[in-house]
Amino acid sequence: MTLASLRRQLVAGEITSAGILHHLSGEIAIRDGRTAAYLSHDLEGALAEAARVDLSLPLGGIPIAIKDNMNVLGQPCTCGSKVLSENYRSPYDATVIRKLRDAGAIPFGRMNQDEFAMGSSTENSALQATRNPHDPARIPGGSSGGSAAAVADGTAIAALGSDTGGSVRQPASHCGVVGLKPSYGRVSRYGLVAFASSLDQIGPLTQTVEDAALVLQAIAGFDPFDSTSLDVPVPDYLCSLHDGVKGLRLGVPKEYFGEGIDPGVRRNVEAAIQNLAGQGAEIVSISLPHAGHAVATYYVIAPAEASSNLSRFDGIRYGHRSGTSCDILDLYKKSREEGFGAEVKRRIILGTYVLSSGYYDAYYGRAQKVRTLIRRDFETAFRQVDAILSPVAPTPARKIGAFANDPLHEYLSDIFTLSANLAGIPGISVPCGVADFDGGIALPVGLHILGPHLGEARLLQIAQAVETRVGA
């Protein structure tokens, strides 16, 4: 049930949008108990939208699942947190939701996530733990784990996720679907509950590269409600999708192929790179000298911005309010203590520390300087090559609970994806095979393709070449 194939059947009158929704609802009832990808879904509301949808629109009649940190009018928006799970309902549509509706799509389902998108496993959700459809004992990745798991499991046609340090691409790799993080500013963030405002970006998770192009086409573009949105033309992402890779120069950074990569991951990624070479691409060895500083830089900047963004959830303006406080300061403390989970508290404390008097220049100021160096590394690389190839994650999906007492190890799982957010460039994860891990369990592996700012069309073109060869 790819988006593109369903669109053809809808236009031909072979199926109806209501039929798709009933089918998905049935699949959710049968399958979601195993993966726990959905937090909620409103079938009646979606059917009402389907009854008046214009099938001539690009996404006319297609249900799209939504990560639970994007506002959809009248629906819950919990961000996977107790802070917002009690009674909050969105008073408006996020810009991406409005754009989906303008394209004829139907927002359907609220997908589980790590609390406030802070995590790489979806274990940090305060509401439930989502599981990988390929092996329920393993994580789906995160923070957009619910979106990725549902698409992989066939309970969603396509989904939106948010990516602050790899939160679309890493779960896409772990679940064996396509995940695209657009360039910073390409897709509006208005209506996305902010984690780290200079890093957040919304992107699609889909079954195919063509589907990702179709969704991106609908949600990309300038938005006056987002001051970081870019007022630049949006290209036709489908027109060059099948142009192949002959003559393209593709860079392989030596820093991304060192120690610590699982042999099965390395084998699949290197095979995909050789396949691209066999299709006519020139593979070029490159260097990203400051790549080793990306994790430390990210975990200064992202928590700093999170500590500021989450200050609004104080029990008065937004979110959970403690019923046992004795004064205003006690209300603040108890509301946040009761509402936030351990990982969110950890990052708020870290972010507040690096922004505090006497430490700002030593940590936050210095991290911003290193961020500039990382961005310049990519600018230099893209003067030599058209795109950069690497693994998405150093290992396949791990078992649930494996890093329960080791947050640092969890942070390192995003080592290949963080830099794209720091530099503001686009990245895509495309399945490049499966490998046997832990006694013969077949788990997906994703190839990571990075491009220059606003270079999504070229990334989709390369990803399509990978998908075509893997599918063959």
Image (cartoon, rainbow, N blue to C red):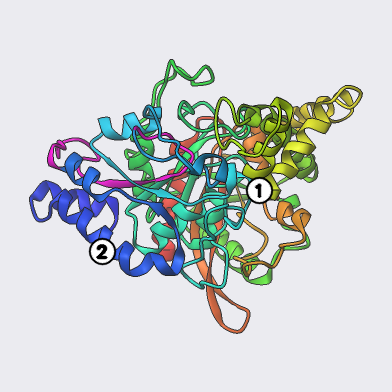
**Looking at the picture, does residue 379 appear above or below residue 22?**
above
Give whichever of 121, 218 is nearer the camera: 121
Q: Quadrant of residue 48?
A: top left
Say which of marks 1 and 2 sits in front: 1
Element carrying mark 1: loop
Give whichever of 297, 384 is nearer the camera: 297
Q: Is residue 447 left or right of residue 206?
A: right
Q: Amino acid at mark 2?
A: Gly
The magenta segment: 51-73
Position of residue 145 measured from the top left corner of the image (x, y, whole percent):
51, 54
Position of residue 242 measured from the top left corner of the image (x, y, whole percent):
35, 47
Q: Please identify the residue farthest to the right as the structure is shown.
A: 358
**Looking at the picture, does residue 458 appear above or below residue 258?**
above
Q: How many marks?
A: 2
Asked whether residue 56 is drawn in magenta, I would say yes
Residue 341, disc: 1
Q: Residues within 10 Å of mark 1 (few under 14, many from 20)?
A: many
Q: Amino acid at mark 1?
A: Gly
Residue 26, disc: 2
Identity of the residue drawn at 26% across and 33% down: 103
**Looking at the picture, does residue 435 appear above or below residue 203?**
below
Identity of the residue drawn at 54% across and 55% down: 171
Give whichever of 369, 377 is nearer the camera: 369
Asked whether residue 35 is drawn in magenta, I would say no
Element carrying mark 2: helix
Identity of the residue drawn at 55% across and 48% down: 449
Looking at the image, tell me whether mark 1 or mark 2 is earlier in sequence order: 2
